């Protein structure tokens, strides 16, 4: 054997810096579209959670009224809502990211059908993955982070390939050999999302404080912070997935995006 690699194995770098840079470029260039796609599901999720378990549990406002579902029940319900919202939002943003990368225009409403179809498997699989990650993290943090990278490609595998409930295995195959670089990208994105969301939330909070604050301000702040975090995260996942397909299978971004044509 001379100079040949096993199928699915490559020495090509992931290109973490380029992926991070492209993620921010897409976020800021298409900020309104990203914010709409991410904020609407986030707002609906917060609204459902707030009306169901109480605004105190949902927004962390101690003076906003007690939860309808107390204690552990409220926490579990919030987690389930967040997973569904994350699944839907990521499914929407995966499509936007490829259109943005290819500089082609599409109606935001065109993303809705494929996203709704993908939400259930993404939500269920990420619930399973989250349990596994949580169990691994109880013992040591590192195994939990490693599993996070292993399952990080579930959403695009469902949306792009129609992998359905096989997406966990597909994600594991795609990320093999690149899990630590993927985790590095994710850590940078999470930190940046927190900073951006915090700045925007602070500005909204200042404006809201002058208007009396309360549940509405808390809802807006949480929606914006969540939308920015989910938006940037969804874009980066889509770009990582595209890079892995390019490295391992020789598939280009335009070929990946052609499934939506």
Image: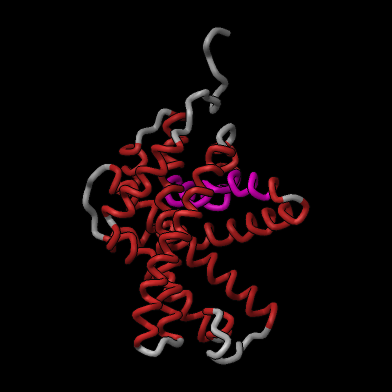
Q: Residue at x 59, y 35 (%)?
A: 176
**Percent x, y of residue 64:** 53, 90
Q: Nearer the viewer, residue 98 or 178?
A: 178
The N terminus sits in image quarter: top right
Q: Residue furthest right?
A: 139
Q: Quadrant of residue 131?
A: bottom right
Q: Residue furthest top?
A: 2
Q: Is residue 162 at all visible to an observer of this figure?
A: no
**Percent x, y of residue 47:** 46, 80
Q: Residue at x 37, y 47 (%)?
A: 23
188 sits left or right of 78 in the view? left
The number of numbered discs placed on residues in the rendered structure image is 0
Q: Residue at x 40, y 51 (%)?
A: 235
Q: Which residues are magenta?
A: 144-168
Q: Nearer the viewer, residue 205 or 42?
A: 205
**Colour scheme employed for the rendering of this structure:** secondary structure
- Magenta region includes residue 150: yes
Q: Residue at x 61, y 61 (%)?
A: 127
Q: Does 204 appear above or below 194?
A: below
Q: Does 142 appear above or below 251?
A: below
- Magenta region includes residue 148: yes
**Percent x, y of residue 15:** 44, 33
Q: Nearer the viewer, residue 20 or 177?
A: 20
**Percent x, y of residue 156:** 46, 48
106 sits left or right of 207 in the view? left
Q: Main secondary structure of the magenta part?
A: helix
Q: Nearer the viewer, residue 245 or 28?
A: 28
2 sits left or right of 32 in the view? right
Q: Is residue 70 at all visible to an observer of this figure?
A: yes
């Amino acid at each position: 054997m001379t100079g040949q690699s096993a199928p699915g194995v490559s020495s090509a770098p992931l290109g973490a810096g380029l992926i991070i840079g492209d993620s921010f470029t897409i976020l800021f260039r298409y900020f309104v579209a990203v914010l709409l796609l991410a904020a609407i599901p986030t707002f609906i999720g917060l609204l459902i959670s707030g009306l169901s378990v109480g605004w105190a549990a949902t927004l962390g406002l101690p003076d906003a009224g007690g939860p309808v579902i107390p204690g552990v029940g409220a926490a579990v319900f919030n987690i389930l809502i967040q997973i569904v919202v994350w699944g839907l939002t990521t499914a929407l943003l995966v499509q936007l990211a490829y259109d943005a990368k290819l500089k082609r225009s599409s109606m935001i409403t065109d993303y809705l059908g494929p996203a709704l179809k993908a939400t259930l498997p993404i939500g269920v699989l990420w619930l399973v993955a989250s349990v596994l990650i949580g169990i691994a993290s109880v013992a040591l943090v590192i195994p939990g982070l490693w599993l996070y990278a292993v399952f990080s490609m579930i959403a695009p595998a469902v949306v792009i390939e129609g992998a359905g409930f096989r997406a966990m295995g597909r994600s594991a195959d795609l990320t093999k050999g690149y899990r630590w670089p993927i985790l590095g990208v994710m850590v940078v994105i999470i930190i940046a999302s927190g900073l951006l969301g915090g700045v925007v939330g602070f500005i909204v909070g200042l404006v809201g404080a002058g208007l009396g604050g309360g549940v509405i301000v808390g809802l807006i702040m949480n929606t914006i912070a969540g939308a920015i975090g989910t938006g940037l995260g969804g874009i980066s996942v889509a770009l990582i997935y595209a890079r892995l397909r390019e490295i391992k299978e020789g598939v280009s971004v335009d070929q990946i995006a052609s499934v939506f044509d």
